[in-house]
Amino acid sequence: MKNIKDFPFADLIDLKIQSVESGKSTCSVGFKRDLLNPNNVIHGGVIYSIADTGMGAALASTLGDGEKCATIEVKMMYLKPAEHFDLTCHTEIIKKGHRVAFLESEVFSNNELIAKASGSFAILSS
């Protein structure tokens, strides 16, 4: 994967890229109270962020020199509230073309599937 030099948003929510290899990634966010919404569960934006970042990391692992990627769209399906546990996201590329790639992410809390995401990303050349 290409090196992420400066990613202050990831630092803000403690998002870590655990592994990346040939079109797949695993990311995590450690639980902290700052991530809770008024309903006392992890905010949906945090769940979106881990899925979106996982997709970018998985796709970046397949890009050539001078290529980068950017989110076109992501559809989230929230299946269950994320309680007071760490989050883990597993992502893989479904199809990669020359200009667009399609990916899917699954987000887990306490080993339970809490959200699924599908997204499309642009592949850009410098």
Image (spheres, rainbow, N blue to C red):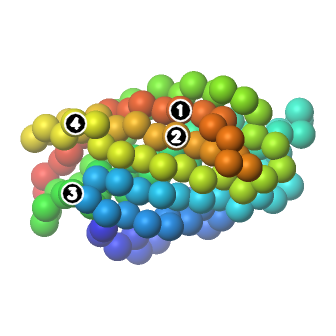
Q: Could you give the CA–CA distance between mark 3 and mark 1, rounded to whole angstroms?
A: 22 Å
58 vs 53, left or right, is left
Mark 4 Cα shell of 10 Å, populated few (<14), some (14-19), many (≥20): few
Rendered image: mark on residue 62: 3
Residue plotted at (75% across, 40% down) = 82
Q: Amino acid at mark 1?
A: Lys
Q: Which residue is mark 1?
A: 116
Q: Amino acid at mark 4?
A: Lys
Q: Quadrant of residue 71?
A: top left
Q: Which residue is mark 2?
A: 106
Q: Amino acid at mark 3?
A: Thr
Classify the position of the C terminus by image quarter. bottom left
Residue plotted at (60% across, 33% down) = 115
Residue 61 or residue 36, whichever sits in front: 61
Mark 2 Cα shell of 10 Å, populated few (<14), some (14-19), many (≥20): many
Q: Earlier in the sequence, mark 3 or mark 2?
A: 3
Q: Earlier in the sequence, mark 2 or mark 4?
A: 4
Contact (CB < 8 A) between labels 3 and 1?
A: no
For the residue labelled by badge 1, is the local secondary structure a helix, a strand or a loop?
A: strand
